[in-house]
Each structure stands twice: as C-alpha cells, then as structure tokens.
Amino acid sequence: MTWLVHGQLGLWGWFLFGFGPVVPLLREEFDVSRAVAGLHGSFAAAGSVLAGLAYPRLTARLGRGTTSWLGTAGLCAGVGVLGLGHRLPLTLLGALIAGAFGSLLVTGSSAILSDHHGPAGPAAITETNAVAAGTGLLGPAAVGGCVAAGWGWRPAMVVLLVPAALLALVLHRTAVPNAPPSPAHHDRNDRLPHAYWIAWTVVVAIIGVEFSMTLWSSDMLRSRAGLGDGAAAASVSAVVGGMFVGRLLGTRLTARHHPDRMLLAALGLSAAGFTLFWCATAAVPAIAGLALTGTGMSLHYPLAVARLIAASEGRPDRAVGRMAMGAGFAGMVAPVGLGAMADAVGTHRAFLGVPVLIVLAALAVLRAPTQTHT
C-alpha cells in the first residue's frame, strides 16, 4: 500500500514541479500578461477546491480505492489535454483537470498513510512526499532540457502518460482499505474543532508559499539573475532538490522531535533561504537560495497535514477534504495574485508576499500547538 502511494505521489511531483516553469513559457507562447499566465496555476488550484468538495462524498460512496484510481486516471487525462493543447483555453482546461484529479490522489494519500501507519503517520507522509520531491527533481530538469534542445516543454509533460496509465491499471486491481468506522468519523453534522481550522490556516499559508516559489521563481531567475529560458526552467529543480534532501532527512527527524518545533524550524529555514534568493543578482547565490528555501519547504506540507489530521479528532477523510479546498483556494489566489503584482510593480517586489505567508504560518502554529507528540 505504501509503495502504491509512493507511485501516485511520484507522478504528482513530476507534474506539479514541472508545471511551475511551464507557466512563464506559456506566457511567452501565448503573448499574455503574467496575471493571465498565472491563471494556469489558479485553474489547477480551482480543481483542488472541487476535489476537496467531492472527496468525502466519493470515499463514502465509492471507497478510497476507486477514488484513488479516479485520481490517477484523471491526472493522466489532464496532463494529456495540457500537453497536447496549443491554445490558451485548452491549456487552462488541462490544468483544471490535472489539478482536480491530482488533488484527489494527493488528498487520499494522506488519509491512507495516516490510518495505515498509525503513530508513524507523520514520518510516512514525510517519506512519500520525499518520493514526490525526488521525481519532482526530474520535472523542471526535463522541461529545461527539452526547451534547450528546441523541442519545447510539451514532451516533458506528455511522457507522464505512460507511467500514469500503468499505475492506474495496477490500482484498478488493488484493494485499498477504507477508513476505520467511528461515530465521530461518520457524523457529517459534527463540526470540526476550532484547533483544526487554525491548523487549516497553516496549510493554506504554506501552499501559497509553495505555489509562488514553483510557479514564478524561474521568472525571477531570468529577470534578476540573467538566466535564459531553458536554464531558468531547469534551475527550479534547486527548489525541488532541497525538498527532496529535506524530506529524506526529515523522515527520521519527525519521528524523534515534536512536529511543532520541526515545522517552526522549517519555516525559519525557508525564510533564510528566501532572503538569499530575493537579494541575489547572480545565478549561483540565487540558485543556492532556492535550494535552501526548498529544504525548509520540504517539511511544511507533511507536518502541516499531520497536525491537521491530529486536530480533526478522528475525522481524517473529512479533514483532508476540507484541507484540499483550502489548499486549492491558496493556489488560486497566490499565482494570479503574485502575477498581477509582478505586472504592476515587478517580480522582485511582488515576491515579498512570500515571507508574509511564512510569518502567518508560524503565528498559526504558535496559536494552536499540537497537544500530543506523534
């Protein structure tokens, strides 16, 4: 079961982190503003909102297994529409489909691992997100390599169709356990506690940071560090590389240290890396800043999700469904908002929204600390 989830998150990692450097390339291809290009991220995030609304109902009616299969098959379809589309409406549609169904499989993975591994859930979620970051390293590198070779970015996305289709076939033949029954879990009228919504705020803030860094950092590298299109797209791998290393190390650390302390330390590391990236005017320090930011970001999502599930008081499917809606909202606002700000005041100044989100996440962690050590 864990390896199947690894495979799903691996597909998502390639798409998500490869999709980031594609957005500035689409802006040039269609000759649109940064705000319009940022709509690709917003459409993908809108898909996450739809997935968040649908996930609890789908798992209740179809079970986690069928829902997981739908997520994988739908991600395959969305990538196909995005990669094969040569007009703005088609690429936006592809982003919407991929975001919706990809969010289904990502949302389900957290609930499945949390139930499957029990107290080791945070470590398991961190590990599978390390796999996503590992394959995510290849996405931007593939986009940059294809652009440098003169093939354009599309082959780097379309190649995902083969492993996605194979994994969908395997999932179709695999029994995925549903959530253990409990009165609290199945009571739809029982509201999630106040502590959950503070934990939800942390997730929303860190998703905004992640979307902003992956979608627009290549534009910053071109405008501030003087890199070309291919090199800037490939250099986004520095963020993902930092996330991969951080999650490999974090798998052990999260099993030994309190999740709140780990998350606050990770937020501080991201702030330090962002400062280096934002102040840099040359390629080497800028890329080093991205790598350091990614290392801190590596633990943002898995720890924030683990805290959120713990705060749900036995409602994991409902909790992650609401989380997906919040993550989608953050993803809708952050890319197009940062793009619009960049059009108005420049990418460099617009990026100052990132540390604001980091501070918001840290304040929310301090406001509602995790009560138990997982």
Image (spheres, rainbow, N blue to C red):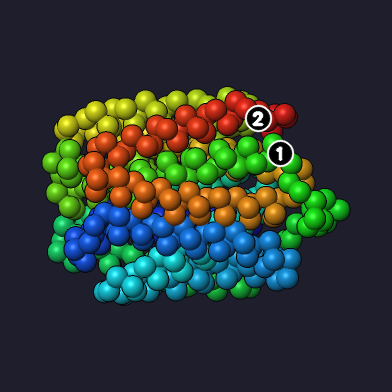
Tell me which residue sits at (52%, 59%) in the image.
48
Name the residue tied to disc 1: 194
In this view, the mark in front (1 or 2): 1
Q: Position of residue 116 (x, y in %)?
A: 70, 50
Residue 360 visible within the image: yes
Quarter occupied by residue 15: bottom left
Left or right of 150, for residue 373? right
Name the residue tied to disc 2: 368
Q: Do the residues labelled 1 and 2 touch (CB within 8 Å)?
A: yes
Tell me which residue sits at (68%, 41%) in the image.
196
What residue type is disc 2 on? Ala
Q: Position of residue 54 (x, y in %)?
A: 63, 65
Crowding at mark 1 (Cα within 10 Å: few <14, some 14-19, many 20+): few
Left or right of 40, for residue 98? right
Q: Position of residue 97 (x, y in %)?
A: 46, 69
Viewer-closest of 87 and 83: 87
Compared to 315, does 25 lie above or below?
A: below
